[in-house]
Image (cartoon, grey):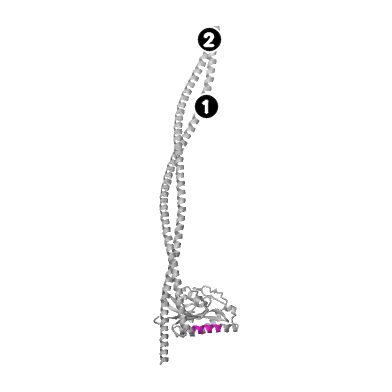
């Protein structure tokens, strides 16, 4: 009777332990789901921090450029003011020159009038000289007649003859002098005509110069007005720029506060994420304790399949080495050569052909052993999965990376947290909870069981399996 009671107590304890394990598993799922959501928020916030930093940098750059623009505008205003002053001074000088030209034109007109009056006087002198010449001629004729009459009178006319000769000599002298005066007057007339011609040309040139100077003065006045308008607009631009500068500085201060707040929140979320990851790992450790205790739990079947896969993988690799198909160094050569044109990127190693040869015969039977198993494959220390299940080893399609990511998962490196832990774990069975990204923001909760693979006592990687949760979890 006592043995029967003890058996009943053991059964009750085992059932309680199973329920406890299930409860712990559900807690782990909730923690993982929360952790995943916080990770997503943290990623979004990290992106927002980057955007905020970029925005702050852009604003700082704008402030710097605005300062340079203000400097340039100030220099432009100074230049415009100096140019305006120079134009005004130049225009004043032109106006002064125009006044001098007006004086010169008036002077040439007066000279022209005086020369015309001088010409009239010269004409009068010419007339008087001609009259003198005519009188001289008449006096000479009279003197000649007097000489003739004195010669006829004999002794009585000698005195009169002397007077007649003197008159004749005087008349000749007057005629000679008058001729010289006439020649001088002719030369003077010719000179005056030349002066008149030059004066007329100077007058015409002065008129043209006056007209050109007036045009230049008007143009310079308009230029000065335009430059003053530019100066006024430059002043408006400067005022606007100073206003923008002030707002940019205020904006920079606000961005800095936002950036600091985002960074602080991001740091706090990171701390929460690490705590949740630690809690998830603690939950996984509790689950492993139940598995290792020998109690039949939901994970037991899958753990046993993973152990089998790891054992068969190690045996296959050692057989390949014994058959000289590959060396131990080649098996542990983790050099990854990208496959040209692959997207997402696929890589090859010195052991990929060996895994292609041996792994399908190991992986496919395990995959088909339970409908909850989604995939199973061997991965190396770095999360590289050389040979996947047949359904995930399709040939990549050109220009269709989304389809390739779902259907061409062989020759890929999965270096996420779960994938790396599965490859680097060397302590025995590892069962992890994780959220599988189905695309479009949809995730499903799964478990990942893995067992380390040792070849000739050296840790190569692990045999990994992903399987769905039991209904009700």
- Residue 48: in sight, yes or no? no
In x, y percent, where is residue 131?
Answer: 48, 20
Q: Residue at x 46, y 83 (%)?
A: 291
Residue lying farthest to the top in this orientation: 156
Question: How many residues crowd around disc 1 within 10 Å: few (fewer than 14), some, or many (20 or more)?
Answer: few
Q: Quadrant of residue 472?
A: bottom left
Which of these two is toward me, 267 or 146? 267
Instruction: Count the labels in the image.
Output: 2
Question: How many residues crowd around disc 2 within 10 Å: few (fewer than 14), some, or many (20 or more)?
Answer: some
Residue 339 inside the magenta-drawn segment:
no
In x, y percent, where is residue 415?
Answer: 50, 74
**Alpha carbon of mark 2 to alpha carbon of mark 1: how far?**
40 Å
Residue 178 lies, with reference to residue 197, above or below; the image says above
Element under label 2? helix
Question: Left of 328 or right of it: where is 295?
Answer: left
Residue 322 lies, with reference to residue 36, above or below; the image says below
Quarter containing the N terminus: bottom left
Residue lying farthest to the bottom in this orientation: 1
Q: To which residue does mark 2 refer?
A: 160
Which of these two is toward me, 150 or 345? 345
Which of these two is toward me, 85 or 297? 297
Cβ–Cβ under 8 Å for marks 2 and 1? no
Element under label 1? helix
Q: Which residues are magenta?
A: 305-316
Q: To which residue does mark 1 refer?
A: 187
């Amino acid at each position: 009777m006592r043995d029967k009671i003890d058996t009943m107590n053991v059964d009750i304890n085992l059932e309680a332990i199973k329920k406890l394990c299930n409860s712990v598993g559900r807690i782990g799922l909730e923690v993982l789901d929360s952790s995943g959501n916080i990770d997503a928020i943290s990623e979004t916030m990290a992106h927002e921090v980057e955007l905020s930093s970029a925005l702050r940098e852009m604003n700082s750059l704008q402030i710097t450029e605005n300062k340079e623009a203000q400097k340039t505008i100030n220099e432009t205003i100074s230049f415009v003011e100096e140019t305006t002053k120079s134009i005004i001074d130049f225009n004043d000088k032109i106006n002064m020159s125009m006044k001098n030209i007006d004086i010169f034109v008036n002077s040439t007109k007066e000279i022209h009038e005086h020369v015309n009056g001088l010409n009239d006087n010269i004409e009068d002198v010419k007339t008087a000289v001609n009259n003198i010449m005519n009188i001289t001629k008449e006096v000479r004729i009279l003197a000649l007649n007097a000489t003739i009459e004195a010669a006829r009178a004999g002794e009585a006319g000698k005195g009169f003859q002397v007077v007649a000769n003197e008159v004749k000599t005087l008349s000749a002298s007057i005629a000679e002098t008058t001729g010289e005066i006439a020649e001088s007057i002719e030369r003077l007339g010719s000179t005056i005509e030349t002066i008149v011609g030059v004066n007329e040309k100077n007058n015409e040139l002065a008129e043209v110069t006056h007209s050109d100077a007036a045009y230049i003065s008007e143009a310079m006045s308009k230029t000065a007005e335009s430059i003053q308008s530019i100066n006024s607009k430059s002043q408006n631009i400067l005022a606007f720029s100073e206003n923008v500068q002030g707002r940019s500085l205020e904006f920079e201060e606000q961005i800095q506060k936002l950036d600091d707040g985002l960074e602080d929140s991001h740091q706090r979320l990171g701390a929460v994420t690490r705590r949740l990851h630690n809690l998830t790992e603690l939950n996984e450790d509790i689950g492993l304790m139940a598995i290792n205790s020998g109690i039949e739990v939901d994970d037991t079947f899958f753990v046993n399949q993973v152990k089998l896969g790891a054992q068969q993988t190690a045996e296959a690799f050692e057989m390949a080495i014994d058959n000289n198909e590959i060396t131990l160094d080649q098996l542990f050569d983790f050099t990854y050569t990208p496959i040209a044109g692959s997207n997402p990127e696929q890589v090859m190693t010195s052991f990929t052909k060996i895994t292609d040869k041996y792994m399908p015969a190991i992986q496919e039977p395990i995959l088909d052993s339970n409908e909850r198993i989604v995939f199973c494959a061997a991965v190396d220390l770095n999360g590289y999965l050389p040979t996947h299940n047949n359904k995930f080893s399709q040939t990549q399609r050109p220009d269709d990376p989304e389809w390739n990511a779902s259907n061409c998962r062989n020759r890929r490196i999965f270096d996420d947290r779960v994938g790396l832990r599965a490859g680097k774990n060397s302590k025995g069975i590892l069962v992890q909870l994780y959220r599988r990204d189905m695309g479009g923001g949809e995730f499903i909760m799964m478990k990942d069981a893995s067992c380390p693979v040792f070849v000739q006592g050296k840790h190569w990687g692990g045999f990994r399996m992903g399987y769905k949760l039991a209904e009700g979890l």
